Amino acid sequence: MPARQAILVFDSGLGGLTVLREIVRARPDARYVYVADDAFFPYGHHGEQQLIARVVPLVGELIGVHAPDLVVIACNTASTLVLSHLRAAYSVPFVGTVPAIKPACASSRSKRISVLGTKGTVKREYTQALIRDFAQGCEVTLVGSGNLAALGEAALNGGGVSDEDILAEIAPCFVEGPEDSSFRTDTVVLACTHFPLLTDRLVALAPWPVDWIDPAPAIARRVANLLGPGHGAADHARAEMIFTSGRRHALTEALQPFFGGRVPA
Ligand code: DGL
């Protein structure tokens, strides 16, 4: 039997688990290494030069240690900035996560969408270019959230997160025309991988129903296309979880569903 392919999934924290979950569904047979750079969390609060200087060498070290067949940068704040640097520096294939502006604009009926990301992601030239190239006549509202990623982490860690705190972060996404509600926002792009950790709360708290666009299934399809169909049974596929702070995770039950039921070492 051929050796199991290894996929390294990288994020600033636990948000990338929402992408990992979909990749594991697409390729249950692969070996997974999930790396949370929690020592530097949240990425959304760091400057661009600081992030490049942090992420590019760190991912290089991880490639050296784990020899992955493919690396997923499961973080919009990093992908919109460092993907080109990573591809120039290392030969392993990379898949990134970037705001799903094109499909959101294509499916919006009111032609008014919002992009909810970190403050870093909405400021990026990369994001501006996606709007210039793919808005297709849509009005795009950029909403940079300072706290929603941390609220997602807190919720996954079992902490109480109040409705008010979530609503304060998402309220600017909901834009209404002066008279006619057919011109109000009908689509919100989840442009941070932490936000789908809170999907049920987002749906419940939205002032009116919208389509929430989570690109994780599309990212998983891309990974499966690049690596090809799986080999071997999923039963003994291993998974490892690494925190750059060196802490041990105490989240076994909460994490298991993201790893397709297996317990990450
Ligand atoms: N999960 C990350 C993203 O997709 C960001 C969270 C952070 O600020 O570190 O943008």
Image (spheres, rainbow, N blue to C red):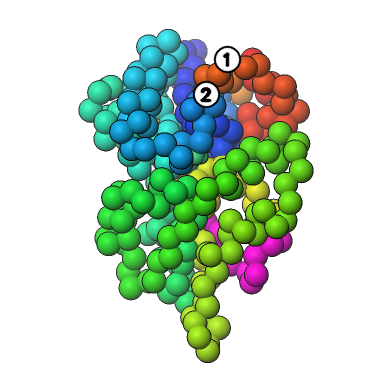
Which residue lies at the image location 37% right of the left edge and 32% below the top edge? 51
From the viewer's side, name the closer residue of 96 and 198: 198
* Residue 113 versus residue 29 in the image, above or below: below
Three-letter code, disc 1: Gly
In this picture, residue 30 sits left or right of residue 223:
right
Residue 205, magenta (yes or no): yes
Three-letter code, disc 2: Ala
Dot 2 and dot 1 residues touching (CB under 8 Å): yes
Instruction: Give residue 236's position: percent from left, percent from top.
Output: 63, 16
From the viewer's side, name the closer residue of 264 and 154: 154
Residue 200, magenta (yes or no): no
In this picture, residue 265 sits left or right of residue 33:
right
* Magenta region: 202-213
Earlier-in-chain disc, 2 versus 1: 2
Q: Which residue was labeled with disc 1?
A: 246
- Residue 51 in sight: yes
